Amino acid sequence: MQKIVVIGSPGSGKSVLSRKLGEALKLRVIHLDTHYWQRGWTPTPANQWDEFLRQTVSEETWIVDGNYTRTLDIRLEAADTIVFLDMPRMLCMYRILKRRLIYQGKSRPDLNEECEEKLDAAFVKWVWDYRKKVRPRVLEAIKRHEAGKRAVILTSRGDVEDFVQEVRAGG
C-alpha cells in the first residue's frame, strides 16, 4: 500500500481515515479539498486541476482523499489501493452538520485556510443524493480500475476501525 485513494460522500470520514492511514504507513496525505478550493471557495480551473492531479499521482507514494468524480479515473488508474467509504446517508448528514458547528467561522484542517466552513442547501442536497447519483458512478469507476489493485469498500464505522487495525498490524 503505497498509493492509496480514499473516496466517499462528504461526511463519510475520508479525511480522518486518510490521516490515520498516513500515520500508520508513514505516507504523505493529500486532501484534495485543500488544493481545489482557493481563497473564498473559488475552484481551481479544470486544466490546472488536472495537471495538479497528474503530478500528484506520478509521485512514488501518497494517500489522496476526495471525490471530484470527473477526475477520479486519473487517481484510480495510478493507485495500488482503493478505499471507498460507502457510509449510511444519515451518518454522513450528521457528520456534515456536526463539523459545521465545530468549525463555524474557521476553516477545517483539510481545507484551504481561506475557506471558512460553510453549509448551504445545495451542499446538503448533494450529500443527501450522493448514494443515488454519485455512488453508482464511483462503483463503476472502481470496477474499471480494480484489476491488480486492492479495492476495499467499508460500510460502517466498525469496518473502518477494523481496516485501520489491519493496516497498523501490517496487513
Image (cartoon, rainbow, N blue to C red):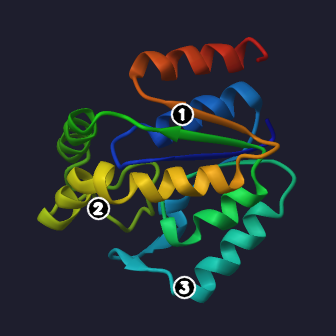
Eye-nearest disc, 1 or 2: 1
Q: Residues within 10 Å of mark 2 (few under 14, many from 20)?
A: some
Q: Which residue is mark 3?
A: 46
Where is residue 148 drawn, in percent x and y?
82, 43
Report crowding for label 1: few under 14, some 14 to 19, many 20 or more residues within 10 A (C-alpha): some
Task: Name the residue beneath numbered marker 1.
Answer: 153
Element under disc 1:
strand
Residue 65, image x, y percentages: 56, 50
Mark 1 or mark 2, earlier in chain:
2
**Residue 23 versus residue 35 in the image, above or below:** above
Q: Position of residue 19 (x, y in %)?
A: 57, 36
Point out the image quarter for the C terminus: top right
Question: How many numbered marks appear?
Answer: 3
Q: Is residue 73 above or below residue 154?
A: below
Tell me the kind of residue under disc 2.
Glu
User: CB atoms at circles 3 and 1 under 8 Å apart?
Assistant: no
Q: Residue at x 42, y 28 (%)?
A: 155
Badge 3 marks a residue whose secondary structure is helix
| Visible residue check, residue 99 | yes
Residue at horizontal 15 percent and vertical 63 percent from the top? 120
Name, please, the residue furthest toward the right.
60
Give 171 or 22, whichever is nearer the viewer: 171
Residue 20, horizontal then vertical, whole percent: 59, 29
> Which residue position is annotated with label 2?
116
Q: Is residue 66 visible?
A: no
Instruction: State left or right for residue 138 relative to residue 61.
Output: left
Q: CA distance from mark 3 to mark 1?
A: 28 Å
Mark 3 to mark 2: distance in Å?
A: 22 Å
